[in-house]
Amino acid sequence: MKLLVTGGAGFIGSAVVRLAVSRGHSVVNVDALTYAACLENVASVGNSPLYGFEQADIRDRAALDRIFEAHQPDAVMHLAAESHVDRSIDGPGDFVETNITGTYNMLEAARSYWTRKGRPEGFRFHHISTDEVFGSLPHDPAVKFTEETAYDPRSPYSASKAASDHLVRAWAETYGLPVVLTNCSNNYGPFHFPEKLIPVIILNALAGKPLPIYGDGSNIRDWLYVEDHADALLLVVEKGQLNRSYNIGGENERTNLELVQTLCAILDRKRRKSAGSYADQITFVTDRPGHDARYAIDPSRIREELGWRPSVTVEEGLERTVDWYLANEAWWQPLLARHGVGERLGVKA
């Protein structure tokens, strides 16, 4: 299969690119190389004859048309997006332009290409989204997001992703474009850009800085190891039912405080401090505006229809993630100088 992957130099996109190439798929990676992208993320496949790269912005329709015509993909995996909630609070315009207008351009470029090709039955437009479009859940383990949960986005980021989801469904209904959608829980793992919670905690701990936790740390997230997510995404683009959505969850709910405490315990074992525990650096800070209390996914559909389940528990995944950051300072150290990294964002509301 020849895949056109947008955002393939980002965190989740690069995991998809690496896995797809390793499985023999041909991949063209389309990425604008904005602040959170790194071509080092795909360096392991960069010299493969199965891999190609196009630097292009999904807001540039002419560039997208050229790329579709040049590479003739069998399927699109659309991951390119602005994704950091705190940044969306400070600058929502970029999220509207990239996540909504960019997705519109991708849909139109894909529709035009698909139509010119005679509407091949095997073509797929796979839109990758987030569980944040569903809003917030109560602290009740019996209640989880399903594919039928009503949308209730609470941040500029989640609202922009909800809008893009709706566009994809509309293009399927109105124009017949063959689509599949996925909504995932919080990802973590190797190559995670150091503005998100887990890499912030690891790198701040190693630097002797405070470990910031919003509010009282009781917010709950369902954690999904990024390589498990990439595996699920390839399964959906290959075998998912047309015009259907699949929720992809890690089945690993933890409060933010529990997660940070686990990370500190792992670091205590692997890179012991001269005195005390890394947990001594935990600092509670003013909560994010509109911070959702809990996310949790019911993954029954993807498990029952496609036979997928996560392979990594959060404890196993965090151990692997800490090991990776300890071994790859040459990757993360230059990123700390990029705009906004290490700063508290999202407090302008």
Image (cartoon, grey):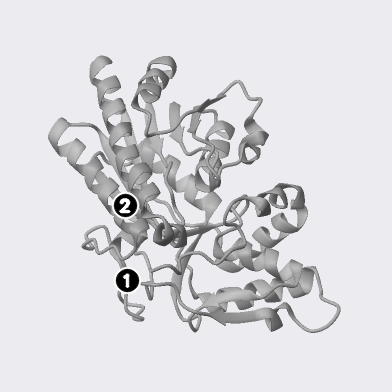
Residue reaching furthest front? 348
Residue 232, above or below 197: above
Mark 1: secondary structure: loop
Query: Quick one: 93 or 232, which is closer to the camera?
Result: 93
Disc 2 or 1, which lies upstream in sequence?
1
Amino acid type, residue under disc 2 in the picture: Ser
Q: Which residue shows up at 15% across the image and 38% down it?
A: 173
Residue tagged 1 = 136
Amino acid type, residue under disc 1 in the picture: Ser
Residue 181 image position (x, y, % from top left): 31, 45
Looking at the rendering, in which quadrant would you find the C terminus?
bottom left
- Where is residue 238, by image quadrant? top left
Classed neighbour count for the residue bearing mark 2: other residues with Cα under 10 Å, few (<14), some (14–19), many (≥20): many
Query: Quick one: 302 or 194, which is closer to the camera?
Result: 194
Residue tagged 2 = 160
Q: Which residue shows up at 51% across the image and 37% down it?
A: 8
Say which mark, if any, is on residue 319. none
Q: Using residue 125 as the reference point, say whether residue 212 is left or right of it.
A: right
Residue 309 image position (x, y, % from top left): 45, 56
Mark 2: secondary structure: helix
| Structural distance between the alpha carbons of marks 2 and 1 | 16 Å
Query: Quick one: 234 or 262, which is closer to the camera?
Result: 262
Residue 259 image position (x, y, % from top left): 57, 73
Q: Using residue 57 as the reference point, say whether residue 179 is left or right of it.
A: left
Q: Which residue shows up at 37% across the image and 42% down it?
A: 98
- Where is residue 22, by image quadrant? top right
Residue 91 image position (x, y, % from top left): 41, 55
Residue 157, above or below 94: below
Classed neighbour count for the residue bearing mark 1: other residues with Cα under 10 Å, few (<14), some (14–19), many (≥20): many
Residue 181 makes an appearance in the image: yes
Front tag of 2 and 1: 2
